Image (tube, rainbow, N blue to C red):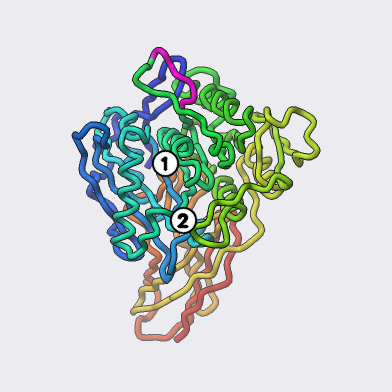
Amino acid sequence: MPFSHLFRLLPSVMLILAVAADVAAQDPPYDVFPEAKPPYYRVRFAASQKPGELVYAVNYTIWIPEHLKTVRGIVVHQHGCGTGSCKSGLTGAFDLHWQALARKHDFALLSPSYEQPDKADCQKWCDPRNGSDAAFQKGLAALGQQSGHPELATVPWAIWGHSGGGYWCGSMVMLHPDRVVAAWLRSGVPLLKANPQRPTIAAFTLPQAALQVPMMCNLGTKEGVTVKDGRFAGVWPANERFFTAVRSQGGLIGVAVDPLTAHECGNQRYLAIPWLDACLTARLPKTVGSPLNAMPAQTAWLAPITGTSAVPASEAKADALQQSWLPNAAIAQAWMQYVKDTAVTDHTPPPAPRHLQRQGNVLTWTAEADLESGLRGFLIERDGQLIATLPEKGQNPFGRPVFQNLQYSDTPSQPLVAMRFTDTQADPNRSYTYRVISINTLGLRSAPGEQKP
């Protein structure tokens, strides 16, 4: 369900962090979440009162592809501030689309859920220096022991964050540039210059190594780009300052303005996932444990930060260090479509469903999402005839309809939707030939997954 948010404006810094409002009673409590049994694992740490440690309890849920011998890295999906967004993190590791990105690169998918009380200070967790960095790494070690993958404690990260989660992800780049493959910052960036009006919030130092980490600042046009007033207006100035500070020193950073949204995530995943895929493909070494590769300079494209057209870096006429950096031609084409209308195209069908089984009148199956365009739903056929579309109408108030539905912080809604269909018109004692076909969010169909008598 969509979450209402109030926002607090930090003077001069203009950093927008969501504060939950009037939704706590509608959200499930923190102890209501999908069961974590293999290939899912979960650890929880209680709140600490010790100086420097995390003052809120936190859950870390991770998905590890089955039969994976060695985890190569971790995709981290970090929610934003406020109780609603924090609770939405409980389902992040179950997202089939983000799992597709992780699976391609032999990565795990991890989603934290900080138990931030209603109207409490988000800065206590979204600034990693307030204990969430140490808790995160402690969680990775504990999950490594629980899952039999001790390498989780040392592998690199591809990180995505929304709002306060974007602040957290950008901050982790500043603190651990050698561990971060790439970072996508949706509507939130860290502070690189001290704010005398908020002396308790220390600015980060921009290390030289962070300039080699690909980063994308992604925000809605109604967050200060075209809408200059209101509770979202400070997001763009904060992003522009962060971009300028990093790019002016040669950092690999871009800006992607969502032309349709304000603070909600919209259709950003259809650019974020391919962008992260491109960065992972370029940066991951052949040998696990070796240093990350540098992004190839010869494939880069450039674009004005609020423009709609990109060109190869070798053809750029304006100052390169004032323009958005894009990793390659394919991402540049996707970026140009995204900043126009978010309708990023895709010409490849999704994978076919598998393990189709029938018990009586009940069909069950498994399916993976399309890496580029996710999963909208399924077509059910009996003896060659279409008998159902599942779901009849996908739900997503923030963008393209998807099978799992989506919450405000880009995670599946609870309860998770099952891949299950009851054929009420079939004779349970009669043999039929069933087929299930996956459909991605652009309407492309997979090959059928079949179950025969």
Can you say which quadrant of the picture contains the N terminus?
A: top left
The amino acid type of the residue labelled 2 equals Gly
Within the magenta stretch, is there residue 186? no
Return the disc, 2 or 1, that comes first in the chain's sequence: 2
Q: Which mark is residue 15?
A: none
Q: Disc 2 designates what residue? A: 73
Disc 2 on helix, strand or loop?
Answer: strand
Whether residue 416 is situated above or below residue 131 in the rendered picture:
below
- Residue 19 appears in the rendering: yes
Q: Which residue is mark 1?
A: 409
Q: Nearer the viewer, residue 86 or 170?
A: 170
Q: Residue at x 55, y 50 (%)?
A: 273
Provide residue 66's location: percent of width, then percent of height: 41, 68
Question: Amino acid under label 1?
Answer: Ser
What is the x, y in percent for residue 255? 60, 34
Residue range corresponding to the magenta coloring: 191-197
Q: Residue at x 53, y 33 (%)?
A: 219
Q: CA distance from mark 2 to mark 1?
A: 23 Å
* Category of crowding for the residue at label 2, using alpha-carbon neighbours closer than 10 angstroms: few (below 14), some (14–19), many (at least 20): many
Q: Nearer the viewer, residue 207 or 420?
A: 207
Position of 195 with respect to 252 (left or right) is left
Give x and y (percent) for residue 157.
46, 49
Which SS does the magenta portion mostly show?
A: loop
Q: Is residue 321 above or below residue 397?
A: above
User: Extreme top residue here?
Assistant: 197
State how many labels appear: 2
